[in-house]
Amino acid sequence: MKTNSESKVVLITGASSGIGEATARVLARKGHRLVIGARRTERLEALAKQLNEEGGAVEFTTLDVTDLDDVQAFVGFAIEKFGRVDVIVNNAGVMPLSPLEALKIDEWNQMIDVNIRGVLHGIAATLPLMKKQGHGQVINVSSIGGHATFPTAAVYCATKYAVIAISEGLRQENTDIRVTVISPGVTTSELAHTITHESTIEAMDAFREVAIPAEAIGRAIGFAIEQPGDVDVSEIIVRPTASP
Ligand code: NDP
């Protein structure tokens, strides 16, 4: 595996599938040292094993981003393993889409808890440390749904608008911390698996035909990380050419 003199310690939430997993693959192969977290630990274990066999430095631990203590323990684990945190990628997310009139209130709350609170927990657990270090980068995964809403996605898009607002506030308040929003368009992953509303599941099938590989998002994250310390890549939108 290629070693990188600019090797960073990068934490990735939601690395058990999709974009998080693909990002771990891209970054490990570039020589960054990783701590990956999610709830499906067996998936993380298999991924870490594979990447470490290729020469990577990848540690994993169970993580539920809705629990602040858990996120703090995740960051503590990274410090224990690698002594610092250069980057956190707040990627974990869920997308149980449905029309508002279906009143899937538990799913609304789940999206708010994972997609907004999870990002805030990632910031809370790393910001004091990054301020002390005098450097750091927070990469928050929003969506094209953070720029426009569409039917069945009101709450999901609200969470992704919130991610952009939180990121922009964080960027403006901190001249020593780099803040990046990654806004993917339709990307191959397991994201639609959380949808329980029948007709929305069917509508997703056509929508996902144009999906780009998750690795494309991992490459964008790699680009944002590898810029010089005084360069903040504030947002990257990556979407299929086939999107309108
Ligand atoms: P996946 O469903 O494949 O991945 C989501 C990841 O989030 C999984 O690793 C899952 O792991 C993790 N996760 C969910 N809930 C929690 C939790 N409570 N604590 C910790 N981890 C959690 O979908 P994607 O890869 O597509 O999603 C990644 C991000 O990309 C999300 O924020 C999503 O909104 C965003 N995005 C995706 C797009 C797409 O088209 N795929 C488009 C735009 C944005 P586990 O279940 O093991 O905990």
Image (spheres, helix red, strand yellow):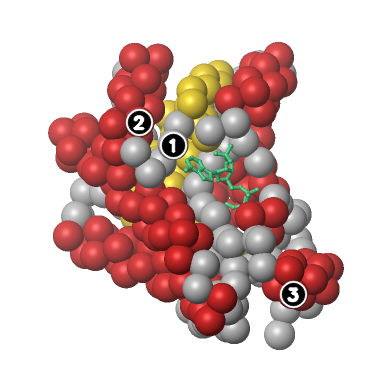
Between the C-alphas of marks 1 and 3, the distance is 29 Å
Please, what is the three-letter code of the amino acid marked with disc 2?
Asp
In the displayed structure image, the side of residue 165 where residue 60 appears, left or right:
right
The answer to whether the beta carbon of the residue marked 3 is less than 8 Å from any atom of ligand 1 is no
Which percent across, then down, holds residue 92?
50, 47
Pair 3/2: label in front? 3
Answer few, some or many: residues within 10 Å of disc 3's Cα (few below 14, many 20 plus, some between 14 and 19).
few
Q: Which residue is at a point 45% across and 44% down the rendered structure image? A: 89
| Residue 70 numbered mark, or none | 2
188 or 30, nearer to the observer: 188
Between the C-alphas of marks 2 and 1, the distance is 6 Å
Mark found first going from the N terminus, 2 or 1 = 1
Q: Please tell me in which quadrant of the rendered image residue 85 appears.
A: top left
Which percent across, then down, holds residue 114?
43, 51
Question: Circles 3 and 2: CB distance less than 8 Å?
Answer: no
Q: Please tell me in which quadrant of the rendered image residue 201 appears.
A: bottom right
Between the C-alphas of marks 3 and 2, the distance is 35 Å
In the displayed structure image, the side of residue 109 where residue 167 appears, left or right:
left
| Residue 64 numbered mark, or none | 1
Q: Which residue is at a point 67% across and 46% down the rendered structure image? A: 18
Residue 27 seen in the current view: no
The answer to whether the beta carbon of the residue marked 1 is less than 8 Å from any atom of ligand 1 is yes
Above or below, 47 against 176 in this view is above
The answer to whether the beta carbon of the residue marked 2 is less than 8 Å from any atom of ligand 1 is yes
The residue that label 3 is drawn on is 199
